[in-house]
Every structure is written in structure tokens, then in C-alpha cells.
Image (cartoon, rainbow, N blue to C red):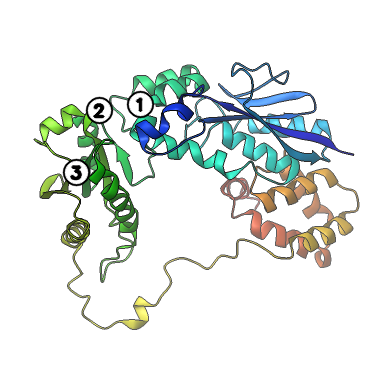
Amino acid sequence: MGEEVKLYVYDLSMGMARQMSVLLTGQFFDAIYHTSVVVYGREYYLSQGIQSSTPGHTPYGDPMEIISMGKTQLPAQLVLEYIESLKSVYTPEKYHLFDSNCNDFSNALCNFLVGAGIPNHILALPANFLNTPFGQTLRPMIEGRIGGNRGLQMTSSATSNVVSKPTDLIKYVYTTDQLNTIMSSNRCVAIDFTSQTCGACRTISPEFDRLIQESVNYKPVGLKGVNAAVVGVKVETGMSVEVCRHFKVMATPTFIFFLDGKKMHEFKGANLAELRSSMDLLQFTAYPPHKHATVPAPVLQSLAENPIIFTTSALLDNIFAKLKFFLIADDELIWDGIRVSMKSGCVLPPGWQNAIERALDKLPGDRVFPLLDVLRLLVLEPSVLEYFTKDPIW
């Protein structure tokens, strides 16, 4: 039997993305997706925290698409407990348009319910769209629509915060204050002055993005643990007049390279060879080889920087089958939830801590190995590691 799980898909741009995306960004975007999950007669979605309503009665109008995700065998009470546990993860304060949004919530819930995530094109499209200049323009409207007051707070601080994902190497700026913030906290900065109406820009800009992403692979000879990546800044000239005036940029594409806040090089035109050599020179100047790098030390250089960690097990189903055989019926639903979580990467079910403690107390020494196998993988999850390390008893 089971209960059917449906994914409701909405378009936050209200058709604007489909009509104008090619003209404004050079790429076609069907929609800016907002999703919710319908199960056991309720629609669950993220807006100022986790909300629920009668299916089809959310503030987002009618869904543009309804996708069947399959059927869940989990009882309604366990599903409600799981959603309740997610409320501490998806709070208004933790909301982020890129990595803690409505689609991430829907993905986590679907993984728990049916062991499968939502379609990849839905997860990836918002970030791809919002990384374009047009997407940055619509960002305050979109965040306000999803996040309520949280969206307004983020919009009000846009003049002082760089509008990009903190961990991204490519950032869009519109004011000199935003640019100064980037240059004060990064040694190597490359600026691409570009325009959506410039044919040469559309040719060279993807190469600029690629070189910026590849800059993380630069390893200064003789130096370990150094982050020598170049931060790429995109300046859309039509939307960033102040920045263009400050640097006296009159043509696109123009590239300017900075080291420790000081201009190192500038050139105009879609010259890929000069762009690549300028990027290499910037990194080499900032992080030259260590003076001892010429001393042969093959043994030291071959040592691994990171421990070897086995993060998965091909025998996970067998391990849980053996564990359930030893535990008989104890906490069966919780252990099923733990298994689904470990296989799909979704949040652990409520009560997992107590289930583990009870199993450790019950199992004799010759039957504890399946549980230790599970724990070995679980402690790679930060929340599990924190639970077991904060109490001296462990």
C-alpha cells in the first residue's frame, strides 16, 4: 500500500524567467523553482520556517507542475516527528537563498520519505540563475517572497554585503564598497568588466569563470596548506556605473588584476592567452616557490595531508539486517530511518540518539560489531560527532 508523496513545483518569477531570461542573461531559464511536499493530506513547505497547509492553498498560487515521488511506507506519526525535528534545522535565521532554501527542505523530506531526492534541475537552477546579473537584480524580490521578514533584512543589508555565496570564488559587485570588502579580505583578485550586450564578453566570460575555478588547483612549490585561489569579480557595466567610473573603464571586456589591494595588470579585449598568463603571473607573484623548494625531499612531499576516511559501506543493508536480527523489534522504525538517512544523506530521524544508547546497553560483546560499523560511519556527520564528544562518558 503506502502513502503517495507528491512534489508541488511553483515559479517564483511568475513567468518572467521564461519570457525574459534569454534576452537578459543569454541563457534560457524555465522558472525559478519553489517546491513543497504533499504527504498524508498536507502540503509542507519552507517560508519563515517550516509551514503546512491544505494542498494547493499556499501563498504561491497554483503549482506549475506536480511530480509524483512515489510512495512512503513510513507511518504518519513518524513523518510528523521527522518534520518537527527539521524545524531546528530550517529556521528563519538559517534561511539562505542558495544552500538552506525551500528546495533543500523538500529534497531532505523526499529523501526521508521515499529514499530519493527531488530532480537535479530544480536543485541547481536557482543558484545558476541567481549567479547571473539579472538574477542578482531579482534576488531581493525573490527572497522577500520566500523569506518574509528574513528576505527584507537581507535586502536592506545588500549595500554593505557582497551578493554572492560566501564559499564561491566568483562574485558580483555593484558598488566600490562591495569591491573594497572583497579586496581587503583576499590577496588575489581579478575583475571582469563585462556586458550582456557585448559579443566578445559572452565569448571570454565563461573562460574567465573557468580559470577562476581552476585557480584553486595552484599549489605553490614547497608550501603546503596555502589557499592560493584567485577571487573573480564580475562587474556588469550597465549596472555598476560607480565601479566603472572609479577605474576609468570605458570598454568591455576589460580585465584588471590586484595583489594585496594594489593594481598589478590591466588589459582590454577577449584575449584568452593574455588572460591565462595574467592569472598565472598573479598567483606566482603572490605565492612564489619557497626558497627551500629546490632541496629534494621526496619522502616528505609524498606524505598525505588528510587522513584516509572510508565514508561509505557497500554492505550497509547486510549490516542493518544483522543488527535488526540481534535487536529483534527494538526501535525498528528508528533503525529503518537511520538506514535511509545513511544511504540518502538526509537528516537523521528523531530519537536516533536513544536508539543507539539502548542498543549499546543491550548488545553483548560478541554482537556489538554491526552497531560499531554503523557508528563508524555516523560519526563522520558533524551533528553525530558533536553529540558523542560533548559528553565525557563517551
Of labels 2 and 3, earlier in sequence is 2
Of labels 3 and 1, earlier in sequence is 1
According to the image, label 2 marks what residue?
Answer: 239
How far apart, in angstroms, are the residues tagged by discs 3 and 1? 21 Å
Using residue 133 as the reference point, say whether residue 90 is left or right of it.
Answer: right
Residue 174 vs residue 186, the one in the foreground: 174
Residue 4 vs 289, above or below: the answer is above
Task: Tell me whether circle 1 and circle 2 mark residues in contact (CB < 8 Å).
Answer: yes
Q: Residue at x 8, y 35 (%)?
A: 248
Task: Tell me whether circle 2 and circle 3 mark residues in contact (CB < 8 Å).
Answer: no
Q: Amino acid at mark 1?
A: Thr
Q: Is residue 108 visible?
A: yes
Split into 4 quadrants, where in the image is the N terminus?
Answer: top right
Residue 377 x %, y %: 65, 58
Q: Residue at x 17, y 58 (%)?
A: 274
According to the image, label 3 marks what residue?
Answer: 253
According to the image, label 1 marks what residue?
Answer: 137
Secondary element under disc 3, as helix, strand or loop, is loop
How far apart, in angstroms, are the residues tagged by discs 2 and 3? 15 Å
How far apart, in angstroms, are the residues tagged by discs 1 and 2? 9 Å
Q: Amino acid at mark 2?
A: Met
Q: Residue at x 89, y 58 (%)?
A: 325
Using residue 289 as the reference point, say whether residue 224 is left or right of it.
Answer: right
Of labels 1 and 2, earlier in sequence is 1
Q: Residue at x 43, y 20 (%)?
A: 141
Q: Amino acid at mark 3?
A: Pro
Secondary element under disc 2, as helix, strand or loop, is helix
